[in-house]
Structures are given as C-alpha cells and as structure tokens.
Amino acid sequence: MRTGSGIGIGEGIAIGTIRVVRRSTLPTERRNVTDTQEELARFAKAQETAIAQLAQLSEKAMQEGSEENAAILEIHGMMLADEDYCDAITASITGEQVNAEYAVAVTGEAFAQRFAAMDDAYMQARATDIRDISDRLIACLSPEQAVQPQWDAPAILCADTLSPSETAALDSKHVLALVTAHGSAGSHTAILARNRGIPAILGVGEAFFSVMEDGQPAIVNAQTGECILHPDAQTLARTEQEREAQREKSARLDKLRGMENITKDGRKIDIFANIGSAGSIGEVLRHDAGGIGLFRSEFLYLEHSDYPSEETQFQVYKQVLERMNGRKVIIRTLDLGADKQCAYCNLPKEENPALGIRGIRLCLHRPALFRTQLRALYRASVHGRLGIMFPMIANVWELEEILAICAEVRAALKGEGIPICESTELGIMIETPAAALISGTLAPMVDFFSVGTNDLSQYTLACDRQNPEIARFFDEHHEAVLQLIAMAAQQAHRHGKWIGICGELAADVSLTETFLRMGIDELSVAPSAVLHLRETIRSLDLSQARA
Ligand code: PEP
Ligand code: MG
C-alpha cells in the first residue's frame, strides 16, 4: 500500500484500476523557412480550426448543462484570438523566419511563464490555459503527429498534467477519477473537474506519479486529497463504507431541493450562494440557493488583460440578474489588492499589502475606476433584484464618500435618460474589527451588513489568512471573532437592517445554531454547501435551550 496526497477537488470517492497516460511531445522543433507568408497562412488556418474545435466543445458542455465549462472553453477561444498573443507569434515567424509550430511553442511558453511569475494564484493558474491553447494550435498545425490521448476506461485516469480542454473532453461515464502529478486548486482543470462531477486529486507530485502503472488497484478520495495504491483489504472495506455513506448523504440532500430553510420552531433564514463568475449560475440553481449573497466582481477584472469597460461589466451583471430571475443578487464592488493582484492595475509594491491599498481603499483612491463599475451596476439594476456591497469598510467617512459617489452616479444616469432601479439595496461588508465596533453608527447609513469572516478573523487575530505556517493561530471560532459578529448583528437589528455572513464560516455547520441565535438572517456559501446547510437548519429547534 502506498499513499500520495494532493489537492482534492470535489467530494467523491472512487475505487478502481489505474490507467496512466504518458504523452509523447508535440512536434515543435525549430525549422528555418524561406516562405514566411506560407507559414503565416498555416498559422491562420490552424487558429481558425482550433477556434472552431473549442466552439464545438463549448456547445457540447452547454448541452450537458455546464455553463461554466462552456464559458471556460469560450474564453480559450477568445485567448486564441488575443491580439498580443497572435502578434507575438506572427512576429516570431516573420522576424526569426521559423516554422509556425516552433513560433507558437516559444511564444506560448513565454506568455505562460509571464503568468506563472505573477503574485496572484488566480493569474498563476492561467499559465496552464496558455499552454493548453498553444498545444491545441500546434496539434492543428500538424494533425497527423498530434497525440490524441485515448480515454478507454472506466478507470482512474492518471497523467502528469491534464489541460482544461482535455478535462472538458473526457467522458465522465468512463473516467472514475483523475489524478495528476501537477496542478493547482485555482486552475481551470480543477474547476472543470468539479463541475463535471469527476473526483480529482491534483498535484500528487512527480515521485508518486512515477510509481503509478496501468492496472494497479487504487482509491481516490477527493475529500481527503489522498490517493492510495494497492489498498489492503481493511482500507478497501473502510473506503467502501465511506463511499456508501456519501451516496446516501447525497440522495438525502437531493430530497431537500425546493424545501424551506426553516428550523423546527419556525425560524426561516435565507441561504444564498457565493460565486466569482456568471458561469457558476447553473451550479447555484442546481443546488437550489435562494439568491447570490456574494458575487466577487474582482474576478471579472482578473480575467481581463485590461480594465473591463462599463459595457462589458453591464452585460455580465445583467446576465447574472436575469438568470437569477427575481432572486436577490448581491454584487460586491471591486476587492483587489492583498492576495488578488492584477498586473494592469499597477498597484504599488507594499510592505503589508493586506493592510494597504485594497478593496474600497483602491476604489476611493481611483474614483474613475469605481464610477465605471457603479454605472454598470446601476444600469443593470433594472434587470433583477440587485444589492451592491462595499468591501473593507473601516471608517464612517469612507461610507459617506461612497454614498455620495453612488448618488452622483445615479443622478448622472438619470440625467442621461438611462433607467435605474431606485430601490437597489446598498450594504457593507463587516470584515474589519473597526466596522464591527462602530456598526451602530454604520447601520443607519446602509440597507444591510454581510460579515466577511475570512478577513474579520485575519484582522481580529492579527493572523495572515494566506500563511499555512500559522494555520493553528487562525482560529475563526475565536471568542473575539464571534463577539464581533454578535455585536454587528445586534446593531443591524436595532436599526431595522438585515445581516448575513458570506465568509467561509457561514458553511461551518457546527456554528449554524450560534449564528441563528445571534439573529443572522442570511448565510451565503459555496453552491455545493447549500443543501447540507439547509439540512442542518431544518434539524435545529431554537425554542429548546442549547444542548
Ligand atoms: C471575507 O473576507 O470573508 C470575504 C467573504 O471576502 P474575501 O474572502 O473575498 O476576502
Ligand atoms: Mg474579504
């Protein structure tokens, strides 16, 4: 028996035999060419074919009901048409007089390395996407030599890496699970595997991957991130039991779709979902969330190579509101900075970025950036039930400035004859201890609060949420954190406002009763956590003294 561990994606457990894919490399050796026009024509044709292939795959994903997967493949199509990328390939072919395959390989790798060197984990994960589209282009340039991995399972598929488009093309009926030597949680491969319901472990490492062989019996537990080769009888029996319990749980939760989030003694609460892109709406609806409690709008900025325009943002917000069909959608304004860095924003290098120009501070520093987003949000407000939420508030004057800018934006739009929804709710995140402590002053100024427990814990405990070395000091159950949440809840209600929690703690069912007793009105969690939370709420009886 040998155990490897990596990043578990999804919740599934698979038991089966292994099928290892060791790919040969694509033909990218350098050839000098005299007719560069012919190479440019080959490149243009390959680009057209690759874009058509991706459109087809995206269509297939859409038919399977996975909009997020369709959106990822669509983005790959857009990346293939990206001007900077294509200009660099063209320049390489004409400037160096080389074959298109080589030009694509070298350019793709240079772009990928640029992404991999960025500070932000999200942007680093984009390196895989660049390599993927470049491989697709090369395969289209030399179709006769391209490697088409054969997924002839059912089996546990193991590979050094799997590109997003390979993952999207997998037949989930034949692939019990995926294990890769390399990969990160934020990669599109991870997102695609999760959305396709394929349990996966990414990044088990080169050493463990090298001992994997076709036909080996194995267990993949995506929940624990463990892959066990040659499991002994005892481990196998235990895992089979766990798998059965998991199946029973998901069948049980399935029955809760369409039911109310209500305690035994009749207290109702909203369960909303957290998302980072419009592509996740399918997942939100599938898990029966009552609305969106946190749309992290910064991902829209991180996905672009330049500031998304007012029109681009408007289209995304409108789409989200329309798809949610009258359910509440809370869109948080740009929360860049700290761990979310965006190259084109040119944020200054800071000693302590988590305490620096992040969240609302950036928006107040760059009001034009803020106004563009607010215009897009207010324009979209007539297409559904919008709430706008501001991150990282610590001062009353910040909120005064924000509200004044919002009023200006509303007046300007009305002056231009653009319709807006007058009842759009405005709220703030309670994610600094300062905001919780002055919540009695802030509450009358807004319509709602939403507690960001990730940052509230970080700032209350003076403990970097990103640093695994100090994980044991990052105690979100700390009495100080809970007292601050209780204080904000009390102040919100004293002023007739509602309060939710949208940090990770909202999904921690060991605290659900505590939150309900504090008077929390809404919990916003990852879509996949909605039904489990509903089950917990329905099992509580607040009329009874605490056990
Ligand atoms: C939080 O801080 O709890 C939160 C929800 O915001 P983010 O995790 O995006 O900082
Ligand atoms: Mg936060």
Image (cartoon, rainbow, N blue to C red):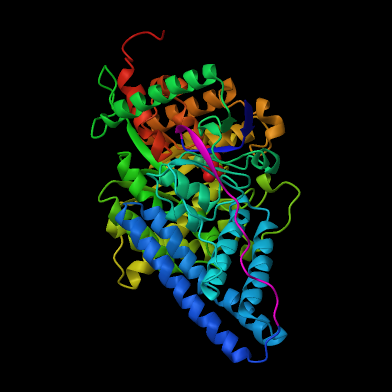
Q: Would you say residue 22 sits in the magenta stretch? A: yes
Residue 416 position, x and y percent, is 34, 73
| Residue range of the region highlighted in magenta in the rendering | 11-31
Q: Tell me the quarter of the picture where residue 33 sits.
A: bottom right
- Seen in the picture, residue 521 relative to 35 is either above or below; the reply is above
> Up-down: is 93 above or below 341?
below
Question: Which quadrant of the figure has residue 85?
Answer: bottom right
In the image, taking residue 415 as reference, residue 33 lies left or right, namely: right
Of residues 394 and 141, the one drawn nearer to the viewer in this rendering: 141
Residue in front for this viewpoint, 508 or 544:
508
Of 297 and 74, the residue lying toward us:
74
Number of marks in picture: 0
**Residue 306: horizontal and vertical position, in percent?**
56, 68
Location of residue 74 in the rendering, given as x and y in whole percent from the top left corner: 43, 64
Q: Quadrant of the C terminus?
A: top left
At a point 49% along the width and 56% down the height, the residue shown is 166
Question: Which residue is located at x 35 percent, y 35 percent?
Answer: 271
Residue placed furthest toward the right:
351
Q: Could you tell me residue 391's position as x and y percent? A: 52, 46
Quadrant of the drawing holding the N terminus: top right
Residue at the farthest front position: 215
Residue 64 counted in the magenta span: no
For residue 333, say whether it is visible.
Answer: no
